[in-house]
Amino acid sequence: MNILVTGANGQLGNEIRIVAKNSCDTYIYTDVLEAEGVETTLLDITSMEAVRNMVQENDVKCIINCAAYTNVDKAETDEALCELLNAKAVGNLAIAMKEVDGLLVHISTDYVFGGDPYNTPCQEDQKGTPTGVYGKTKLHGEQNILAAGCKHVIIRTAWLYSEFGKNFVKTMLNLTATKPQLKVVFDQVGTPTYAYDLAVAIYKIVNERKYEENNGVYHYSNEGVCSWYDFTKMIAEYAGNTGCDIQPCHSDEFPSPVKRPAYSVLDKTKIKQTFGISVPYWTTSLKVCLERMNVKL
Ligand SMILES: NC(=O)c1ccc[n+]([C@@H]2O[C@H](COP(=O)([O-])OP(=O)(O)OC[C@H]3O[C@@H](n4cnc5c(N)ncnc54)[C@H](OP(=O)(O)O)[C@@H]3O)[C@@H](O)[C@H]2O)c1
């Protein structure tokens, strides 16, 4: 089967490049821009014509969509572009897959939740209540897939990090190494996700072809629950950055253009039971990622 990966130069896309290296399927890695050191076919998913041509010329039967507008704060003042990429373009991919009876694996987010107070892990069928433009446009993307009616596996994930790109782990590695003191919010609770683990789960779903009878929305993050403060403490501890005094603080000490979910832990029971996926605990995966980044533990 020919599989198109969009946004292949981002965090998740790069992890899929690693995980799918020895696949019997043919993976075509695309992104809107080229990147150093990796082969990339150019594809802007906001163009329906470009998407359709790419699918037809390469006999694509599956798209793994890793492309997105992911800058949550900037999205608040850039709604049109955010909607174009996170919703309209996702619809393009879904229509293209519907036309060839193909599968769309799409990545969504815990930010579709957050508007209501929760204190138990979010279920797949729970009503989306996004608090900002990013979450709202990602929810529209999910809705556009359902409207197109293609085969689909939508995976909502959260707090993604990897050795590629910019992310919280890299920022905190740097800050805890260079600052004597740091305040980090403890009133936002969720679960980190190592993008490599998510890539392994996606690869298993596609590879084992169990999606035909299991279309739907799924949740995936690592196991466990923590606040951004706990996450930072663990990053610093593993990296041996003992010189930084890390203190918990409230979100209102860091004014932000967007209100982030206070509790967005994802319930992963469905993906584990349906596809037989085992999910690593968050600190175990954090350690693996730091080792791959050559951080001395
Ligand atoms: N990051 C998180 O914490 C997080 C949390 C929950 C869910 N997610 C979701 O997980 C998925 C993967 O996230 P990620 O962190 O791997 O994203 P990422 O690193 O930001 O990668 C996204 C990729 O999409 C590319 N792209 C931008 N515009 C495009 C276009 N018009 N056509 C094709 N590609 C385009 C980007 O290129 P440029 O860099 O050149 O713009 C980038 O290479 C996304 O759906 C995201 O919403 C992420």
Image (cartoon, helix red, strand yellow):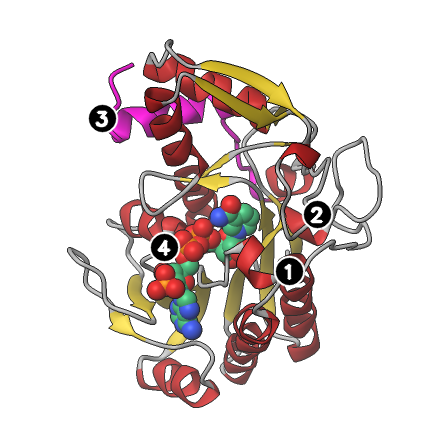
Q: How packed is label 1: few (under 14 Cα within 10 Å), some, or many (20 or more)?
A: some
Which label lies toward us, 3 or 2?
2
**Which structural element holds mark 2?**
loop
Q: Tell me if label 4 and label 2 are in contact, CB under 8 Å.
A: no
Residue tagged by mark 2? 259
Is residue 153 positioned above or below 176 on the image?
below
Q: Which mark is residue 215?
A: 1
Quarter of the image with the N terminus in it? bottom left
Q: Could you tell me how far apart the alpha carbons at marks 1 and 4 are, in whole angstroms?
A: 25 Å
Residue tagged by mark 4? 10
**Which structural element holds mark 1?**
loop
User: Residue type at mark 1?
Assistant: Asn
Q: Could you tell me how far apart the alpha carbons at marks 3 and 2 are, in whole angstroms?
A: 34 Å
Reading the chain from its start, which is encountered first: label 4 or label 3? 4
Residue 91 figure quarter: bottom right
Which label lies toward us, 4 or 2?
2
Which label lies toward us, 2 or 1?
2
Determine whether the beta carbon of the residue marked 1 sits less than 8 angstroms from the nearest atom of ligand 1. Answer: no
* Residue 277 within the segment the image draws in magenta: yes
Determine whether the beta carbon of the residue marked 4 sits less than 8 angstroms from the nearest atom of ligand 1. Answer: yes
**Which structural element holds mark 4?**
loop
Closer to the camera, 277 or 158? 158
Numbered range of the magenta stretch? 275-297
User: Residue type at mark 3?
Assistant: Asn
Q: Tell me if label 3 and label 2 are in contact, CB under 8 Å.
A: no
Is residue 208 positioned above or below 151 on the image?
above
Reading the chain from its start, which is encountered first: label 4 or label 2? 4
* Residue shown at 43% from the left, 86% from the top: 52
Residue 15 locus on image (x, y percent): 34, 46
User: Residue type at mark 2?
Assistant: Lys
* Residue 78 within the segment the image draws in magenta: no
Q: Which mark is residue 294?
A: 3
